[in-house]
Amino acid sequence: MEPIFANACAYSRENLQEAMFALNRRKKILISLWFLFCIAGFIYYYIVLYDYLFIIMAFAMLALLLYKYVYQILNKAKVMAERCIVICHEVPVQTVRFFEDHVEPVSVMSKDELSLNYDQLIRVEKSRRLYVLYFKGKIMIILDKSKFENITLEEFEHFIKEKAVKAKVML
């Protein structure tokens, strides 16, 4: 059976970072708002009570926020990219073939073919340069927007919205 279209994406450090930021975007916004509300409360109590403990707590909350949603994501992407380079001795490229009823990612690292049905798709995220498909079983597929074969970006978005009925499509 012939694929409808295909995509090849390098699993470089930059692509992994962008994909992870895209997957954590909504959660990051909600928790950031909560942290900023707490920081504003600490600053308010510092002004009212003039107690340095509250300003120290505000800075600690800000440092925790930056650590959790910037440093950890950047570090995780760096470790994943370095692991891929150690295994392959180069930046691995994954080719993803799209069929009418399933997706087949083919990894350069293992040469294994995996068949994933569209009903296993949980989330579809879009970033500046990538699409991120997140399947059941914590399987993440990164698609480069500039590397689609036989399809345009608009056609892909329509196709994935049509096929991924159970998924949260955030395009």
Image (cartoon, helix red, strand yellow):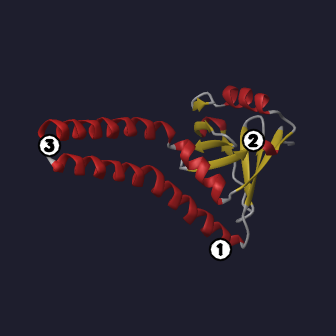
Q: Which mark is residue 145?
A: 2
Query: Where's residue 145, x and y in %?
Result: 75, 41
Whether residue 95 can be seen here: yes
State the residue at coordinates (39%, 39%).
32
Residue type of the residue flagged with mark 2: Lys
State the residue at coordinates (57%, 63%).
78
Residue type of the residue flagged with mark 3: Tyr
Mark 3 neighbour density, 10 Å: few (under 14) some (14–19) many (20 or more)? few
Which of the image's four quarters has the N terminus? top right
Q: Quadrant of residue 158?
A: top right
Q: Earlier in the sequence, mark 3 or mark 2?
A: 3
Query: Where's residue 134, x and y in %?
Result: 59, 43
Provide the residue designation for mark 1. Answer: 86
Mark 3 element type: loop
Q: Earlier in the sequence, mark 1 or mark 2?
A: 1
The Cα–Cα distance between marks 3 and 2, rounded to whole angstroms, is 53 Å
Mark 2 element type: helix
The Cα–Cα distance between marks 1 and 2, rounded to whole angstroms, is 26 Å
Nearer to us of marks 1 and 2 is 2
Q: Quadrant of residue 116?
A: top right
Query: Where's residue 39, x and y in %?
Result: 29, 41
Q: Is residue 69 left or right of residue 91?
A: left
Mark 1 element type: helix
> Looking at the image, is 103 positioned above or below residue 170?
below
Q: Is residue 117 left or right of residue 36?
A: right
State the residue at coordinates (72%, 40%).
102
Q: Kindly indicate whether the residue at mark 3 contacts the one at mark 1 (C-beta within 8 angstroms).
A: no
Nearest to the observer: residue 15 or residue 137: 15
Residue type of the residue flagged with mark 1: Val
State the residue at coordinates (62%, 63%).
81
> Looking at the image, is 26 positioned above or below residue 6?
above
Provide the residue designation for mark 3. Answer: 50
